[in-house]
Image (cartoon, rainbow, N blue to C red):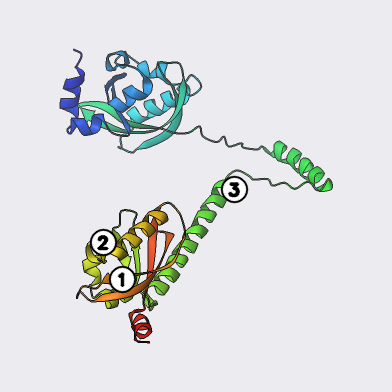
Amino acid sequence: MTLSYQDICKNVFSEKDFIDNSLLGIGVIQDGRIIYANNTILDLSGYAFEEIQENNIWMKVIHHDDLFIVKKKIELKLKEKKYNTTRYKCRIVLKSGESKWIEVFSKNFYHNDRLAILFTIIEIPKPTPVIELSTNDLAKLSVVEQLLNGFNIPYRILKTGDLHKELEEKLLKEKIELKDAEQKFRHLFETSPYPIILMNFNGRIIECNSGTEELFKYKKEELIGKNFLKFITFPSNSLSIFEEAYKQLTKGQKLGPFEIQCFTKEGRLVWVRTSATLLKLYNEILIQIIIQDFSEEKSIKKEK
């Protein structure tokens, strides 16, 4: 008896729509046949579900250079007593004849009291080949190295595993440097005597410091996550200046200080000198607004 695609979905899986349209290719092999494949696998391979139900179709789909290894992986998986996940890379041949690299994760489970293999796949770029050098090759390499030194030719030789180790060390160093930079920024941010506001391109406030609370009389909790213009309001003439400055900033233009008026929570009208820059923080491009209250200075000038 051949189960229909709908029956397989209903009997084997719940949340059919979610699984069918997953970013991962999801399938099941049982008794040498692919008894389930989601839309992602069908779209990638170019085959219809009825076509891939053919016995041992996977042996035709796997690239001939990788078939022996994949066949061994499947045989060993079916003999396993534990339900460990197996991971490997291989090439598949699409219905169009094109070949693509995929990464496979597979695990045993029981369906209708019989052993089956649940597998997920994802398309990956062509892996970079790793060249293992024998003792004889290393001896030859030593001669080449001496020649390069003699001609003063700059070079660098990476042994197996060196590149991976170097990349890990580089990423760790960058992570430490980024964390250190963020800690320094946080210290300057919190101790600044000027109000500082961080917001995204939609105007949502991501962070603000104690100076912001002191000037505008809003608690930080009232501002975080809210739209800037819903809390910080302006007279009409100042609003147009701010909106124009905001448009220029979102286009990547650098803004020097500009003077505008705005209202505090208490309704007090203050003069502020504002500068804004783009800042990469928390893996996002944010707008940093630094504000200086110069109402007192403005008032003194008027009196004179």
Q: Furthest residue to the front?
A: 304
> Mark 3: which amino acid?
Asp
Helix or strand or loop: what does disc 2 sit on? helix
Report, in whole angstroms, how far the alpha carbon at label 1 lies from the one at label 2. 13 Å
Q: In the rendered view, tell whether residue 64 sits above or below residue 123.
A: above
Q: Where does the C terminus fall, quadrant-wise?
A: bottom left
Q: Position of residue 255 (x, y in %)?
A: 45, 62
> Mark 2: which amino acid?
Leu
Report, in whole angstroms, how far the alpha carbon at label 1 lies from the one at label 3. 59 Å
| Picture residue at 40% right of the left edge, 16% below the top | 95
Q: How many marks?
A: 3
Q: Disc 3 marks which residue?
A: 162
Most foreground residue, 198 or 142: 198
Q: Disc 1 marks which residue?
A: 261
> Mark 1: which amino acid?
Gln
Q: In the rendered view, tell whether residue 44 sits above or below residue 293.
A: above
Q: Position of residue 70 (x, y in %)?
A: 43, 26
Decide if residue 128 is on the left or right side of residue 195: right
Decide if residue 236 is on the left or right side of residue 286: left
| Picture residue at 28% right of the left edge, 70% below the top | 262
Crowdedness of circle 2 by 10 Å Cα count: few (<14), some, many (20+)?
Answer: few
Q: Say whether disc 1 or disc 3 marks the residue closer to the N-terminus.
A: 3
> Is the C-beta separation of discs 3 and 2 under 8 Å?
no
Helix or strand or loop: what does disc 3 sit on? helix
Residue 69 can be seen in this image? yes
Q: Disc 2 marks which residue?
A: 229
Q: In the rendered view, tell whether residue 174 sits above or below residue 269.
A: above
